[in-house]
Amino acid sequence: MHSSRRRFIRNTLFVSGVVLIPMQACRRIFKITDPPEYFLFNTSDRKLLEAVFSHLFPDDGNGPGLDQIRPVDYLEWVLNDPKLERRSSELLKKGTGWLRQVAKDKYNAEFIRLGTEAREEVLRELEAQKKGKRWLSKLMTYLMEALLGSPAYAINCNQAGWKWLNHSAGYPQASLTVKYGTYGYGL
Amino acid sequence: MATDYDVCIIGSGAGAGPVAYTLSQKGYKVLVLEKGSWFNEGDFTKDEIAVCRRSTYTPSLQDEPQVIESRNQKGNWEAVSNSRSGPDFWNGCMVGGSSNLMSGFFHRLKPIDFRLASEFGQYEGDTSTDWPITYDDLEPYYTLVESLVGISGRVVKHAFLEPRSTPDYPFPPLTEHPFAEKFDRAATALGYTPLPLARAILSVPHNQRNACSYSAYCGSYGCTTGAKGSSRAALLNAAIQTGNCDIRSHSLVYQLVTGRKGRVTHVRYFDARGKRRNVDARIFVVACQAIETSRLLLLSANSAFPNGLANRSGQVGKNLLFSGGGLGSGVFRSGDYPADEFSAMNDYHLFVNRALQDWYVIDTEKTGRIKGGTIDFLQAHANPIRRAVQVKNQEEKLLWGSGLKQALVEEFRERVRLNFEVFCDWHPNPDCFISLSSRVKDLFGLPVAQIRTGYHPADLLPGEFLAEKGKELLRQMGAQEVSASINGSPSPNLVAGGCRFGKDPETSVLDSECRAHEVENLFISDGSFMPTGGSVTPTWTVYANAFRVADSIARQL
């Protein structure tokens, strides 16, 4: 518990450090030298999640791109929070498997190989399942956090989400040393 | 016998600050024990992820859960730990408590609130009683809060205006949002009295506190200028400057220990390192907010008080109160207004600060004469993540793709929402109380609070009546998509009762001075004392009563 808490704080601080340097703001937020167990999604899962997010929030010329929102890296950060409820953690991890199964049952294919219409059908079919809807809803909630949360978390890069929606953010915002995971009750 | 302190206060919020302030000013040695951290203005940010999307100012529900009892579909009570699901009843565990995070909508109770039972009678299953004091007893302390905590506003005479010993508030109103003028016109056209809403936020600098900076991130957030009248900014800082008040943060009190004479001799607490420590004092004051105050008394059971400290009557934890009422809203669309006007309406930095109290008593053919309440009008909080999440959930199916993106643009750029909140009495009843869980413990090994949240059906009628008035007002202002929801859900941030005061030791925990009937050196100064909550938010009353309790303690010392 304590070691995971320390690791979370260390990586949270590291994320802030990256954000302070604009040129690096939208690079991967975790160092490749981090312990392998830190990455909770494997390469295949990451590609699958990127495909899902690109469907949920498509590049249609309206609003920031996923390279500025960075929802998959944000999900990794969320999953590494030792205060995350176990039920939420399990839901996030299991969802990719459920999606693969629906894609296989319906098209006998990988989700990432499907076209836009087929992806829509697969995701709507998954949504029709109670557990599938919970997973998709959770993904979208974190997508909204990554779109409109503080750039100190290596999301909403260059305040792209706020600018898109003409949102005036409060002041002061999160900083290197004052952000979720670095202060608060019990710390 | 010499003690470490004259007075030991457990908790540091609105019920504690006035006691620490008053007694330290009088030269008594005061210790405040607070389980949370100690933040100051420079530590607060407007970070929605940390403040509103995660538990930063409150305990992790995995470490310190509560058990919530609610009715299941069969109508039976079902107890579930909120580490798995359900509402979170923790509020602002830090020096200054949840007063750091309040919106500061401040109303006094009215004289009629002190005699709810005798004015309106008791319903079946309603355990409300009159207060053992009157409005006149509390009025000087309401006035004191205006100047010491800092309340900005403007008094307008109306049918239910409570008697005042001063003509107006000591601080001028905050700068108002363009909606305020629209509201005034609409209310006047309908024959209602538009009321400026007083706020515990400084409109001008005072003492060592700055004025409001209109950040648009107020409710739920810590104030970065010190303008918000938190117990910490307004009272505890001044108490410390006397040299007579010590504050120990990260100090979680788990037991009040009594001696042979039935007096509290010392408290036991865990310090920041988890080490068990003791401290003694002549008088002890508990102000941990209603749920944790009752829990601490129940945790302090011993051979002399086998059912919990000061609980021979079995009343500790009973008559828990929330705020009755609900929410409503309406939408204003960009196409209906000139661009400049809509742009001003779609600005979150200023305050709407309006209320209606025309129906504090409702007397119609349909309802009969019943207690009514208050409608506060406010812009929705600025939080963009919350707004976006609502957009994706607004249809039966999840909204995603280009449709979601267009809906987000419309929500943020082309729509402004004006909300209202209805406040009416939450009648105390046998299905609303606090006990100790017999099966769930926190990370310290202590039984957690178990909260049964039943409401009285009579609470819904005034709420529904007031919601119709709120909707009528919004429509008159030109709002569309007007809706409201009134239900019996508890309000986790507005909690009182559990150790009510009264004249009869068989039906109350505290006497009229908020001293425990059964323990002569134990006072409770948070909202636990309230037998009924009134039809307004209770914070001003908690502050005022705590000043009254402080004077009573000073007389005893």
Image (spheres, coloured by chain):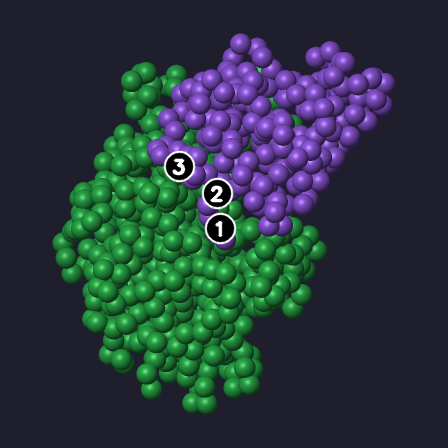
Chain colours: A purple, B green
For numbered disc 3, what is the local secondary structure?
A: loop
What's the CA distance linking mark 3 and mark 1? 19 Å
Q: Which chain hosts label 1?
A: A
Q: Which quadrant would the C terminus of chain B be assigned to in this image?
A: bottom left
Residues A12 and A109: in front is A12
Mark in front: 2 vs 3:
2
Say what amino acid the circle numbered 2 marks: Thr
Q: Which quadrant would the N terminus of chain B be assigned to in this image?
A: bottom left
Q: Residue furthest front?
A: A33
Mark in front: 3 vs 1:
1
At x 57% / y 40%, what residue is drawn?
Answer: A8
Task: Please give left or right for residue B116 compared with residue A18 in the image.
Answer: left
The reply to whether label 3 and label 1 mark residues of one chain is no
Q: How many marks?
A: 3
The answer to whether residue A50 is seen in the rendering is yes
Q: Position of residue B510 (x, y in %)?
A: 40, 76
For numbered disc 2, what is the local secondary structure?
A: loop
Q: Which chain hosts label 3?
A: B
In the rendered image, which residue does mark 3 sit on?
B46
At x 29% / y 21%, what residue is drawn?
Answer: B341
Task: Please give left or right for residue B72 compared with residue B59 in the image.
Answer: right
At x 46% / y 82%, what residue is drawn?
Answer: B258
Q: Earlier in the sequence, mark 1 or mark 2?
A: 2
Q: Position of residue A28 (x, y in %)?
A: 58, 23
Residue A182 numbered mark, or none? 2
Local crowd size for mark 1, using a 10 Å CA cut-off: few (<14), some (14–19), many (≥20) = few
What's the CA distance linking mark 1 and mark 2? 7 Å
Q: Is residue B293 above or below residue B346?
A: below
Q: Residue furthest top?
A: A61
Confirm or deny contact between disc 1 and disc 2 (CB under 8 A): yes
In the rendered image, which residue does mark 1 sit on?
A187
